[in-house]
Amino acid sequence: MTTQDPASWIGRKESCDDNIDVGHIARMALSLDAAAPAEGDPLPLLWHWGLFIKALPYRELGDDGHPRRGGFLPPVDDRNRMWAGGRLQFLQALRVGTKGRRESTISAVTEKEGRSGKLLFVTVKHEYLQGDALCISEEQDIVYREPSPPKLEGAAVAPKAQWSEIVVPDPIMLFRYSAVTFNGHRIHYDEPYTTLTEGYPGLVVHGPMIATLMCRAFTNANPGKQAVALSYRGLRPLISPRPFNVAGALGDDGSANLWAEQGGTLAHQAELRFKP
C-alpha cells in the first residue's frame, strides 16, 4: 500500500454536472428491462447512479478498471473495492431532461478488522441538485478489502415476502448496466480477471443494480407510495447468471423492508421509508 494516509482524504471534494439526457435515460431503461420515463418525468429511484459520472482517460484507470486511487478517493491500491451500502434522503424528484449537479465530499475514512482481514471504509457524501433545489442527499459507503476469498454463502434466512420479482442477471444485462453507468470495474464483464484475480466463481452482479431493482419491485407493488428515505447494505455478492429474487414487505410505520435473496438466504437488504 502507498505510504499516504487515507484519512488525509477526508474533506476532499468533487462536483459533476449532467443534462439527464432523455436518450441516456432510455438506454438505462433498456439495461434494467424497464419502461423509459419521458422528458420532464421524475427519475425512478436510484437511477441517478447512472448519471453524474466523472469519466477519466484510460491512463488514469487502475488494473481493476476503476479510476486510480489517490485522486478523489484515497490511495489503497493493493485492495479490492466494493460498495458496502449507504443511506439516502429523497427530498424531491430529479427530472428527466433538466440539467443537474452532483457535489461530493469524502466525509469519513475508517480502518476495521474483519474476519477476512483489514477493511478500509470510505464514506462519501453526495448532494444532487437541480437549480438551487437539493433533490437527493446521500451517504455512500465504499469498502476496500485485502485480497481474500469472497463470502458467497448466505446465513440469514429471507423473511416472508408480500411481493417478489425474479431477476436473471445474464452477462448481457451486466454489460449493459456497466455501459450506462460507465462502470469499468472488470468483475462485471471480464470473467478471466474476475475468477483469476479477484477470486469470484463468475461475473459479479452490480450492487447498485441490485438495490435499484429492489426499489423498482417496491414501486411496482406499491404504486402511489412516495419514498422519502432508504438505507441499504450488501451482505454477499450475487454471481451471474444464477437467478435471484428482489422482494419486500410493508411494515406498520410507513416503512418497507426490501431484500434480494437467493436460495432462501439474504444477499442484500434495505429499509425504505415512504410518506404515509
Image (cartoon, grey):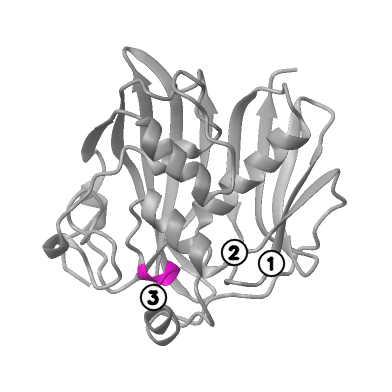
- What residue sits 50% from the left and 51% below the top? 31
Between the C-alphas of marks 2 and 3, the distance is 15 Å
Looking at the rendered structure, the kind of residue marked 3 is Asp
The C terminus sits in image quarter: top right
Q: Dot 1: what SS?
A: loop
Tell whether position 106 is magenta. no
Q: Nearer the viewer, residue 152 or 211?
A: 211
Residue 21 in picture, x, y percent from top left:
35, 31
Label 3 environment density (alpha carbons within 10 Å; few <14, some 14–19, many ≥20): some
- What residue sits 76% from the left and 30% below the top? 222
Between the C-alphas of marks 2 and 1, the distance is 6 Å
Q: Dot 2: what SS?
A: loop
On the rendered structure, is 220 left or right of 54? right
Task: Check residue 190 in the rendering and tell me which mark sits there, or answer none.
Answer: 3
Looking at the rendered structure, the kind of residue marked 2 is Pro
The residue pinned by badge 1 equals 243
Q: Dot 3: what SS?
A: loop
Residue 146 in picture, x, y percent from top left:
39, 74
Residue 207 in picture, x, y percent from top left:
52, 56
Q: Earlier in the sequence, mark 2 or mark 1?
A: 2
Instruction: Using the rendered image of the protein, determine whether residue 170 is visible from the camera's viewpoint.
Output: yes
Label 1 environment density (alpha carbons within 10 Å; few <14, some 14–19, many ≥20): some
Q: Earlier in the sequence, mark 1 or mark 3?
A: 3
